[in-house]
Amino acid sequence: MTIMDQSPADAGRYEDLPDVSPIGAPLDWKWLRGAKSEWGVKPTPGPRGLTMMDIAVGSYGDVPDHPTHRSMAPRGADVDPDTPDMGYILNKKSDVWAENVTELYEEAVARQWSATRDIPWGELPELPSDIEHAMCQVCTTLTEVEMIAADLPAKWMWRMNHDFIEAKMFLCTQIMDEARHAEVFRKRALANGGGLLMSRGSSEGLLRTIIEAKTYTQATALMHLLGEGFILDIFRMGELIAPSPVEKRMFRMAMQDEARHVAYGTMHIRYAVEQDPDVVEEIHEALDHGEAVLTAFGTNQDFGSALAVLLGGGVDHVEDKGFPLQMELQKKQFTSYLARCERAGISRLHRTTLPLELMGIDPATVLAN
């Protein structure tokens, strides 16, 4: 496929166009006479319609490693030399890209759901007081921590070069997902007559660590590999945590969103490391601190004990069933986290200060995941 101007016949046809408009304003017909364009290159819709993958044809699908301008002009358009510089600081493809990001965007827009209509709120049963308190506490904490995954992309998106439009579009869907998660957990805390309960400093410490990361790649590692990965495992345990079909539906819908975010972050870190090995150490430094902060969050006396009550089916079985299952959940969370790091090209097995033996984590199991 080559870049084509209009035909010679068209060129002659447009020579006599006026130079000024009826009100005397100058006219420029460059867009009609010979704009640089792959004229005639036509994408073909697939079974799902016209996707972002379908329109990545010819040069329009080529994402530059180092864009030549820093404007909001669409990638592939002719850009005037006097176009204002937007001041982007993330101008390398490896700063933000992931090989799966376009597919994840399409999945995200196809699987949007409503916290108002798609959760059967009218079927929420009255629960024993201890179970309702536990669910309200879990939802209080989840309402608090979910929005960090919206605030962080919002902090960095306007700093990303616009040639990486697919990555920016995906992060827009993540922001919408997280707003919906905050909505659904806040609604659940209030829907059954319970309410919003305790907020502790350990939660805020984790959120501050993520939002104050020095680079976007560090922030992605902290949020997607570590923070959202831990929350994803909680959602995956929704069948055990949920006391009714309402909560099961809530966790299941949130899980599909969270899995996309973690998939993007894991593949972004992998791409960044492959393209620029120098970023490895800065990612490790961020995770060194992040693991310590997350461990404090994981031992949060309110969130942890509320999870144990739900896992045990009530306070009567919190010791013989709830806490053992909670320990299994934590083991799963840390094992999954270390496995994600391996997939991302950031092996933590010989760097982490986590007491793997004490938690019963076998490095061979991590490598097998």
Image: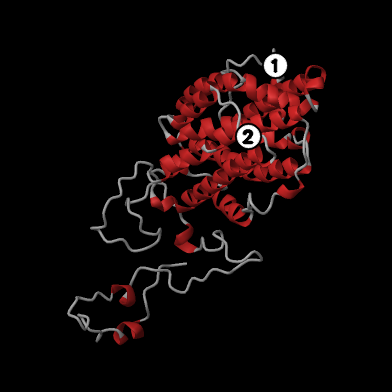
User: Where is residue 347, by image quadrant?
Assistant: top right
Question: Can you give x and y, in whole percent of width and height, for residue 332 in the image?
Answer: 71, 27
Kindly identify the amino acid type of the residue bearing the numbered disc 2.
Gly
Q: Residue at x 40, y 61 (%)?
A: 76
169 over 195 or under it: above or below:
below
> Considering the image in quadrants, where does the C terminus appear?
top right
What kind of element bears circle 1?
Answer: loop
Question: Can you give x and y, in whole percent of width and height, for residue 231 in the image?
Answer: 63, 33
The residue that mark 1 highlights is 359
What kind of element bears circle 2?
Answer: loop
Q: Residue at x 60, y 42 (%)?
A: 181
Q: Residue at x 59, y 52 (%)?
A: 108
Question: Can you give x and y, in whole percent of width and height, for residue 125 in the image?
Answer: 78, 41
Is residue 234 at least partly visible in the picture? yes
Q: Nearer the viewer, residue 318 or 223?
A: 318
Q: Is label 1 in contact with label 2 (beta carbons under 8 Å)?
A: no
The residue that mark 2 highlights is 195
Kindly identify the amino acid type of the residue bearing the numbered disc 1.
Met
Question: Can you give x and y, in whole percent of width and height, for residue 97 in the image?
Answer: 49, 44
Q: Is residue 271 left or right of residue 309?
A: left
Q: Residues within 10 Å of mark 1 (few under 14, many from 20)?
A: some
Is residue 94 at least partly visible in the picture? no
Whole-number angstrom distance, CA of label 1 to CA of label 2: 34 Å
Q: Residues within 10 Å of mark 2 (few under 14, many from 20)?
A: some
Q: Residue at x 53, y 38 (%)?
A: 147
